[in-house]
Amino acid sequence: MADEGIRASREKLRVLDGLSSEEIPSDRIALSLVHSIERIDVAISPIKWIEPRRFKLYGWGKNTWIARRPFVEICIAPYIRERIYRLCKQIVGDPLEIVLDGEGVVRPAVREPLGIHESISISQQDYEDAIALADRLRARWSEIEPRLVWSET
């Protein structure tokens, strides 16, 4: 009898990562990438980490250079990155709006297809803005389960 109750309650469970964007409950969406071609709602669970960064190193060896523009780095599961890559490959040069809690927070131009690397980056004017954006992104993400969060400061 107890097994029947457990089985019945399991039937009501949904695996959110497998849902289409339209089926993900709004309180489970960490951020959305919005363009007229497509909207990609990124659920909370595929996000591995979110970190503000002061600068980024590019290249290798003697060909290394530093981009001194602060940004927020978001590591996302591969299956979401593939969707982001397919969209961004079509819209290089166009703006892509990043939406948090129904509010557009930034609308950068896509310079190259996002999703090639393990993480995506959102540039900011200064490091304090990067920290604030990372904190906003982490707010809902860290409510779901305890996560270790560190800072460069």
Image: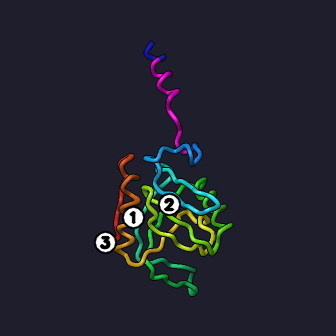
The mark nearer the N terminus, 2 or 3, is: 2
Front in this rendered view, residue 7 or 87: 87
Name the residue that disc number 1 marks.
134
Query: In the current view of this chain or complex, which residue is farthest to the left?
Result: 153
Residue range highlighted in magenta: 5-17
Query: In the current view of this chain or complex, which residue is farthest to the right?
Result: 90
Q: Which mark is residue 75?
A: 2
Specify the quadrant that holds the C terminus.
bottom left
Above or below 11: residue 131: below
Q: Amino acid at mark 3?
A: Thr
Q: Amino acid at mark 2?
A: Cys
Label 3 environment density (alpha carbons within 10 Å; few <14, some 14–19, many ≥20): few
Name the residue that disc number 3 marks.
153
Q: Nearer the viewer, mark 2 or mark 1?
A: 1
Which quarter of the picture shows residue 33? bottom right
Q: Main secondary structure of the magenta part?
A: helix
Q: Looking at the image, which residue is at 56% across and 83% down?
A: 61
Query: In the current view of this chain or complex, which residue is farthest to the top?
Result: 1
Q: Position of residue 56 (x, y in %)?
A: 48, 77
Q: Position of residue 126 (x, y in %)?
A: 38, 78
Front in this rendered view, residue 67 or 57: 67
Q: Is residue 149 left or right of residue 108?
A: left
State if disc 1 and disc 3 touch (CB < 8 Å).
no
Count of picture labels: 3
**How far is disc 2 from disc 1 in space, using C-alphas?**
12 Å
Q: Amino acid at mark 1?
A: Ala
**How far is disc 2 from disc 3 in space, using C-alphas?**
20 Å
**Secondary structure found at label 3:** loop
Specify the quadrant that holds the N terminus.
top left
The mark nearer the N terminus, 3 or 1, is: 1
**Secondary structure found at label 2:** strand
Q: Looking at the image, which residue is at 59% across and 63% down?
A: 35
